[in-house]
Image (cartoon, helix red, strand yellow):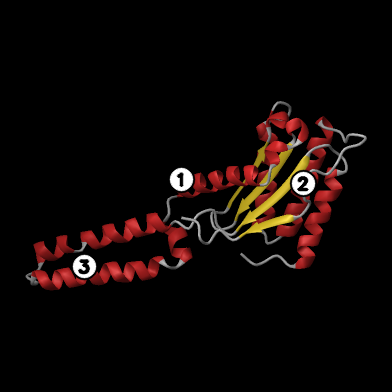
Amino acid sequence: MKPFSSDEHAVIADAISRAERTTSGEIVVVVARASSGYFFFALMCVALAALAVPLPLIHFTKWPIEYVYLLQLAVFGLGVLIARWERFRVAIAPRGLKQARAHLRAVEQFLAQNLHTTKGRTGVLIYVSDAERYAEVIADDGIYKKVSPEIWDELIEDLTAQIGRGNRVEGFVAAIETCGAILAEHFPPEPLGEDELPNHLIVIDGAKLP
């Protein structure tokens, strides 16, 4: 994922501030390079591949067992080296595992950014994980009671389409504006309302995740 420039951070932060002026809700945008490192899954695949090496050699060759064992060690060692490459680990991880890890990380970020502590329970998280090509909106209880999940699905479809076309900043700004309009319809701004959470793009590395 290409790093966000200071200008891109500023544009997204301004979009959040403008959207929140129309509502008592709080919007937080988090972008992760990856939601998991997939180390354990990759090592499991490497170990299974190494364990499978002796089977065809024992049955179809007359190699000495010592050679078979050395080849097995070599396969495991090479596999461990390849598994150090993040793109490889992400590529071999099943789609279901990647979606589960990304959703779990989104929920963790919802709690870590204190969206569950807002007045009226009107916090919304827009979460995007680059490695998994995953995006999700998590809204607190106060919002789920009034806003259909299908509306958030449409927002995510538009956002991912924009990111896919290389217009990630425009996509985030449009998603934030849409989110603000949705919240404003059900949660108008309060006369003495305060901005409870920071209005900036949060980028997390995620490289050291298991």
Mark nearest the camera among 1 and 2 is 2
Which corner quadrant holds the N terminus?
Answer: bottom right
In percent of width and height, residue 130 lies at 59, 57
| Mark 3 residue type | Gln
Q: Secondary structure at mark 2?
A: loop
Q: Nearer the viewer, residue 60 or 36?
A: 36
- Residue 72 - label: 3
Q: Secondary structure at mark 3?
A: helix
Gap in angstroms between the C-alphas marked 1 and 3: 30 Å
In percent of width and height, residue 60 lies at 10, 65
Residue that badge 2 annotates? 197
Q: Residue at x 59, y 42 (%)?
A: 107
Q: Nearer the viewer, residue 25 or 132?
A: 25
Q: Is residue 23 left or right of residue 141?
A: right
Q: Nearer the viewer, residue 63 or 3?
A: 3
| Mark 2 residue type | Leu
Q: Residue at x 74, y 67 (%)?
A: 5
Pointer 2 or 3: first along the chain: 3
- Residue 96 - label: 1
Q: Residue at x 45, y 68 (%)?
A: 85
Q: Residues within 10 Å of mark 1 (few under 14, many from 20)?
A: few
Gap in angstroms between the C-alphas marked 1 and 2: 32 Å
Q: Residue at x 50, y 54 (%)?
A: 36
